[in-house]
Image (cartoon, rainbow, N blue to C red):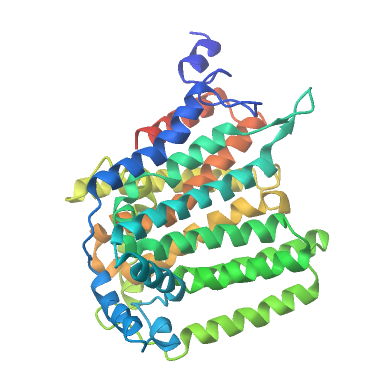
Amino acid sequence: MSDDFISKSLFWSKNQIFCPPKYKPTFWQIILFFFAPISVIFCISLLAVDIPFYDQWRFIQLIHLAKTNKLTIIDLWAQHNEHRCIFPKLIMLIFAHWTHWNIRVEIFANIILAVVTLLVLCKAATKQFSEVGKSAKPLKPYTLYTAFSVLIFSLAQVENWMWGWQMTVFMNILCTISGFYVLCLTPFNRNLSWLVAFACGVIATYSFANGLLYWFISFGVLLVSFIKNRHWSILHIISWSIGTVAILYSYFYDFKSIGHHPPLAYALKHPHKFIIYFNTYLGTSIFRFLLHPVNEVQILIIFLIGSAGLAVGLTFLIRYWHKLGLNSTTFLFWNCLFIYALLSDFVTASARCGFGLLQATSSRYVTISNLYWIWLVVVLYFLIRQNLLRLSNKILFSFFLSVFCLC
């Protein structure tokens, strides 16, 4: 059996799903790109209900304070578990006032946030991987656009799609990705880019607690850029450091630990549970929708998928680190997503593994763990475009992309 036959049978010809940058997307790329968001909108339209759920019942008190003109910044700044969700609360209060608290409006607002997130990722891919054709027209990486759409609008995160309160997560992801984009690719002048990136960090942090990680990763971005090409100055780095300290102080001022949550020492005492939780957290992005985990066997399957994905990613990262320049400023944006996803996984596993391994399969986490798989898709695409992977690896990537489509 020839390599050409195998390639074509796995969508590897230029007229199928995977192809190098082109002037126009293929038919299947268009179908897959729009099928993912349309399927989410269809499911929400069919299944979403205008009934408060879980944490939303606590939001009633804020609505009452707003209605009676007694709402203060302290009420918005108050903890919600480990989070301080100032900006999502403000938006939801506005929606509640305009719509008499129609929760379906919040749910559809989350779709808009996801769409903007997808556009930012596609813009970054265009800057990174577009080529100029013979006719001087840009050739765009439509394969990556398709993969991003399938991941961003994955039904595996069903709980986030059906729960308006999860605006906290969608806002965090959008602002985190946008902040990294502005810092790494600087679409504006340096000072304006710095201000926009800082504002994105503030919104991300005061939407969901994982946003605290943004400040440390972004400091690394500024430092790497300064060392590599002096793109950011010492003044930018010092100003960012001062701002980071101010944000951290304001966040943890009068911070109270959550009594009913397991202690962080639990992860240290049970490292095997931490590792299983960590890898299961990653694997849920791929097979959470196909497998509804109710027993240990299904959790084991998801754990193995997460472990395999992590092993593949780390293998490529180590093997091609210097050869492909994955540590350079040209690939910095995608590496930020990789680090943010794994650090979020680490923090969540440390704080939540005491709840049990079943909790690691929660669909609430898929929106964040998706960033790792987005990074992995980009890395594989980049390696294949550089002809550094053998046919067997190309077959693996085609299978990998097909699994995304099924999920």
Q: Which residue is rendered at x = 27% and y = 70% of the image? A: 56
Residue lying furthest left in this view? Answer: 295
Residue lying furthest bottom in this view? Answer: 254
Q: Is residue 379 left or right of residue 346?
A: right
- Residue 141's place in the image compared with 10, above or below, is below
Q: Which residue is rendered at x = 52% and y = 29% of the image? A: 393
- Residue 57's place in the image compared with 346, above or below, is below
Residue lying furthest top in this view? Answer: 1
> Where is residue 159 shown, x and y percent of the image?
29, 55
| Number of numbered tags placed on the structure image | 0
Q: Is residue 108 left or right of residue 362?
A: right
- Residue 245's place in the image compared with 122, above or below, is below
Q: Is residue 83 left or right of residue 296?
A: right
- Residue 18's place in the image compared with 237, above or below, is above
> In front: 86, or 309?
86
Place residue 238 in its image quadrant.
bottom right
Q: Is residue 4 visible?
A: yes
Residue lying furthest right in this view? Answer: 230
> Where is residue 279 shown, x and y percent of the image?
37, 54
Q: Quadrant of the C terminus?
A: top left
> In front: 330, or 349?
330
Place residue 246 in its image quadrant.
bottom right
Q: Which residue is rendered at x = 60% and y = 66% of the image? A: 217
> In front: 340, or 146?
146
> Where is residue 201 shown, x and y percent of the image?
57, 69
Place residue 271 in its image quadrant.
bottom left
> Where is residue 363 shown, x and y percent of the image?
31, 54
Q: Is residue 261 visible?
A: no
